[in-house]
Amino acid sequence: MIERTLVLVKPDGVQRGLIGEVVNRFERKGLKIIGMKMIHINREFAENHYPKDMAKLFGKKTSEGLKEFGINTTKSEKELGEKTWEDLINFITESPVVAIVLEGVHAVKNVRSIVGSTSPHEAAPGTIRGDYAHASMIYSSVTGTGGRNIVHASGSAEDAKREIALWFKTEELHEYKRADEFHTTGR
Ligand code: UDP
Ligand code: MG
C-alpha cells in the first residue's frame, strides 16, 4: 500500500512564490519527499507529460462549458479540445516547474485530496487549488491562458509510474528515514 506519486508546482505556483507552501502541505501530512528538482521543460517533454489524446476529453468539457455560459462558437468539439490542450502546453512550458516525488501509504489518493478538484472554482477551501486560485477551466479556455491551478498530481498509481519514469532517473530518487516515520507509517 506504500505508493509513489508525482507532484509538479506548475509555472503559476513557482511565479507566485508558492513552492514552500505546496511542499509544506505534503511534508506536514507525513508524506516523504524522495525526489525534487526545478526544471524548465520544452514542448516535446510537455507533450509526453500531457499526451495529445487529452484534447478529446478537453473538447467535450470545453464545449459543454461554453453552452453553460451561453457563448456561441463556430469551432468543433475537436478544435476546442485541441486549443485547450495547446494552451496547456504553452502554460506548462512558459517557465520552470518544481517536480517532486512523494512516497507514503495510499500516496496517490492522499495527494489528490490535498490538491483538490481540477477547476479552482470547485476546489474545496483547505485544498491547495481551493486556497490559492479561484478561476475555472472554462474561463482559462475562453481566455486562452492555460489551466492555472498551481499543481499537478498523478491521477492513478499507473499514471504515477509512467510520470515518475518520465521526470526522474532512478539515481535521482532517494532512500532515507524520516524521524517521524514510525508514527506515520509504522515502519
Ligand atoms: N485543463 C485545462 N482545461 C480543462 C481541463 C484541464 O486547461 O478543461 C488543464 C489543467 O491545468 C489540468 C490539466 O489540464 O490540471 C490536466 O487535466 P486533468 O483533467 O488531468 O486534471 P488534473 O488531473 O490536473 O486535476
Ligand atoms: Mg490528470
Image (cartoon, helix red, strand yellow):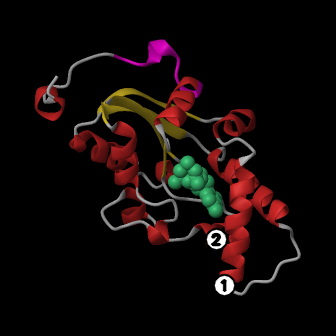
Q: Earlier in the sequence, mark 1 or mark 2?
A: 1
Asked if the residues shown at circle 1 and circle 2 are in contact, with their CB atoms under 8 angstroms apart, the answer is yes
Q: Secondary structure at mark 1?
A: loop
How many angstroms separate mark 1 from mark 2 (CA)? 9 Å
Quarter of the image for the C terminus: give it.
top left
Q: Which residue is mark 2?
A: 138
Q: Quadrant of residue 49?
A: top right
Between 51 and 152, the residue placed more toward the observer is 51
Q: Using residue 26 as the reference point, say whether residue 91 is left or right of it.
A: right
Q: Which residue is mark 1?
A: 69
Tell me the residue at 46%/55% (across/down).
Answer: 16
Between 130 and 182, the residue placed more toward the observer is 182
Range of magenta residues: 166-174
Between 11 and 111, the residue placed more toward the observer is 111
Tell me the residue at 69%/34% (across/down).
Answer: 48
The reply to whether the residue tagged 2 has its Cβ within 8 angstroms of ligand 1 is: yes
Q: Quadrant of residue 82?
A: bottom right
Magenta highlight on residue 170: yes
Tell me the residue at 53%/47% (across/down).
Answer: 10
Quarter of the image for the N terminus: give it.
top left
The kind of residue tagged 2 is Ile
Question: Dividing the image into four equal quarters, which quarter contains ligand 1?
Answer: bottom right
Percent coordinates x, y for residue 134 in the rendering: 47, 71
Between 122 and 25, the residue placed more toward the observer is 122
Q: Say above or below: 43 vs 63.
A: above
Q: Secondary structure at mark 2?
A: helix
Percent coordinates x, y for residue 86 in the rendering: 76, 53
